[in-house]
Image: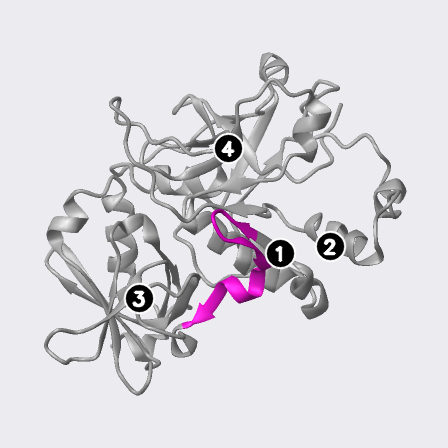
Amino acid sequence: MKTNKRITRAYCVELDREMSIVAARREYLSLEPPRERFTFLCTNEECRELKAKITGVNYDVNPQETTQLQTAHFRANPKDEHCSDCEWIEHDSSSDQDKSRPGETEEQAALRKAKRKLDDYIDIFDPSLKEKTRGGEHRGSGGDEIDGDGHGTGVRRTNAEPSDRRRAPTKTTDLERLVESYRTAKAELSKDQFNLLTLQVSGYGVVPLRSYFRHIGAATSLGDNGCVLFGGGTIKRYGEGFSFTFYDTLADQRVSLYVPAKQMSTYRYRRYLKELVIQADEVRYVTLYSLGLLEENPKGKGIDLKVKDLRQIAFVLGPAKSPAEST
């Protein structure tokens, strides 16, 4: 059978595990050049026996402000067959999927249809940093599997039937994956559809997705704002470390993030992050998304954005500079 659902995860042959396209990008760009593209197969073991390939699209470039056609995503190989219980096959017809379901309100139906338009919609986000086990692995709660650096993959290892897995919500601890989901939703959906989207934040509750992302100039307080803070700015390198300064101020004070070389050196994906920092010289601006804390600078030089772990930041590169801007 052919898949007819958007594929959010695939099995990577080289890494021997399932992963989201965001995790695939981070792993690929962390390899030392020259790099060879990954081979992806379906997440279903029976489909893998059929050699059902999955194509990873645009995971070999850093995240940028791009059109949806350029967004990193998975797609099925149209020539390959999948088994009948594959989680990426929806057995209802398109017309059935558009109909309201029993007990479903008009708003719930509109929300379900909006989510179907997105490559990888995140239902549940856990912002907590997972502690390492003795084996060096990170584990999440609620069955969400976490990769070796604490990034949520959205993969569930359960004994559920395939039909149950298809209905299961997507959960992650991966901030970058959540940011990608948010950005894609804003680009793909109408304003009314986007405003319907909700996010369950572990330990907090269900909130409108739009309210979980707050521009730095609208931060409500110092400390933890209980949301993702974001804004455009510039990066300056300091050896292996770097700083990021937002264009917009908070209460007329400059807001900056400083990442020392020591913090970079302990980050598993430092090569990936370093390439982003270097490439920032080639673009007009960079947007930073962060779960960090806001603190007054001890020397009275504005406000510091502090992150305990580099998993709490995600960068998106802006458009490339013109030749005149590059000189």
Q: CA distance from mark 1 to mark 2?
A: 9 Å
Task: Confirm or deny contact between disc 4 and disc 3 (CB under 8 A).
Answer: no
- Colouring: one colour
| Amino acid type shown at disc 4 | Gly
Q: Earlier in the sequence, mark 4 or mark 3?
A: 4
Q: CA distance from mark 4 to mark 2?
A: 24 Å
> Could you tell me which residue is drawn at 40 percent across and 67 percent down?
230
As for residue 204 lying within the magenta part, the answer is yes
Q: Earlier in the sequence, mark 4 or mark 2?
A: 2
Q: Nearest to the eye among marks 1 and 3: give it.
A: 3
- When the figure is inspected, residue 102 is found, relative to residue 148, above or below; the finding is below
Task: Confirm or deny contact between disc 1 and disc 2 (CB under 8 A).
Answer: yes
Q: Toward the viewer: 236 or 308?
A: 308
> Could you tell me which residue is drawn at 33 percent across and 53 percent down?
312
Q: Magenta stretch?
A: 200-215
Mark 4 neighbour density, 10 Å: few (under 14) some (14–19) many (20 or more): few
| Amino acid type shown at disc 3 | Gly
Q: Earlier in the sequence, mark 1 or mark 2?
A: 2
| Amino acid type shown at disc 2 | Leu
Report the residue marked by disc 1: 198
Mark 2 neighbour density, 10 Å: few (under 14) some (14–19) many (20 or more): some
Q: Residue 241 location in percent, x, y? A: 15, 57
Q: Nearest to the eye among marks 4 and 2: give it.
A: 4
